[in-house]
Image (cartoon, helix red, strand yellow):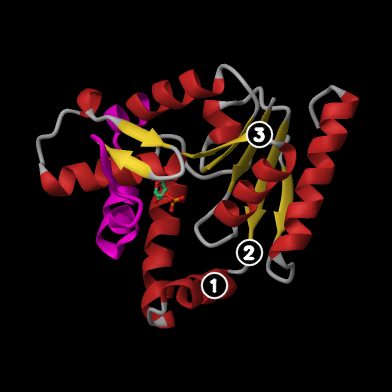
Amino acid sequence: MIVAIDGPAGAGKSTVARAVAQTLSFTYLDTGAMYRCVALARIRDADCDLDSLKIELDDAITLNGEDVSDAIRTPEVTELASEVAAEASVRAAMATRQAALLAEGDWVAEGRDIGTVIAPHAELKIFLTADPQERARRRAEQTGRDLSEILAEQQDRDRRDGERSLSPLVAAGDAVQLDTTTLSADEVITQIAELANAAINGGGPQ
Ligand code: DC
């Protein structure tokens, strides 16, 4: 079974997807971390070969054996990840890897195109949104960075991720849309876990 969780940065995807996976005893897949690894590899070597990048997403995220869990969260990598994610060759390579992972087992996969492109057959699709000010506020709280700077960067990324021609950030037609602006993480986690349990017990797509 696949639970797909898509949405813009700061809507709460990572916190929620990780917790829902734990609640359901499913495996968590952070597809954004893959794009971030590609961006980091590019910063280090502009000509790096995509196919030979060894990306492992376990408790720690490793790139060619090195723990890059922190290194992929810098503003520089965040910015470049959004750029490399618009490249056809990068998307194709990541899509192949993601589809291979999702082919077996039970997953909570988060990203931008899981419900639309990577796993359109997912049994449950969630599209998480939140007010842009609130999303930026959350990021500022997490990182300690300046709110207005984060808001400006977020607007750029939202535009790039939403307007690119390949797999833009859009909700799947059959996704459940959840606005998390005024909800706590626990409330969102509970709602999604309930929807997933209903999908498990009911059998069919939502
Ligand atoms: O979710 P995140 O911030 O870690 O994602 C990093 C970048 O990767 C973000 O700009 C959007 C892009 N991304 C994507 O295009 N498709 C995905 N499935 C996941 C992330």
Residue sitting at 42 percent across and 37 percent down? 57
- In the image: residue 189, left or right of residue 78: right
The circle on residue 130 is 2
Q: Is residue 196 magenta?
A: no
Q: Which residues are magenta?
A: 64-92
**Position of residue 122 measured from the top left corner of the image (x, y, whole percent):** 67, 27
Q: Is residue 66 magenta?
A: yes
Q: The disc labelled 3 sits on which kind of residue? A: Phe
- Position of residue 123 relative to residue 125, above or below, is above
Per the model, the C-alpha gap separating discs 2 and 3 is 25 Å
Q: Is residue 164 visible?
A: no
Give neighbour class at mark 2: few <14, some 14-19, many 20+ (Cα, 10 Å). many
Q: Position of residue 112 (x, y in %)?
A: 51, 43
Give the numbered dot on residue 138.
1
Determine whether label 3 and label 1 are within 8 Å by CB: no
Gap in angstroms between the C-alphas marked 2 and 1: 10 Å
Q: Amino acid at mark 1?
A: Arg
Image mark count: 3
Decide if residue 12 is in sight here.
Answer: yes
Q: Are marks 2 and 1 in contact (CB under 8 Å)?
A: yes
Label 3: which secondary element: loop
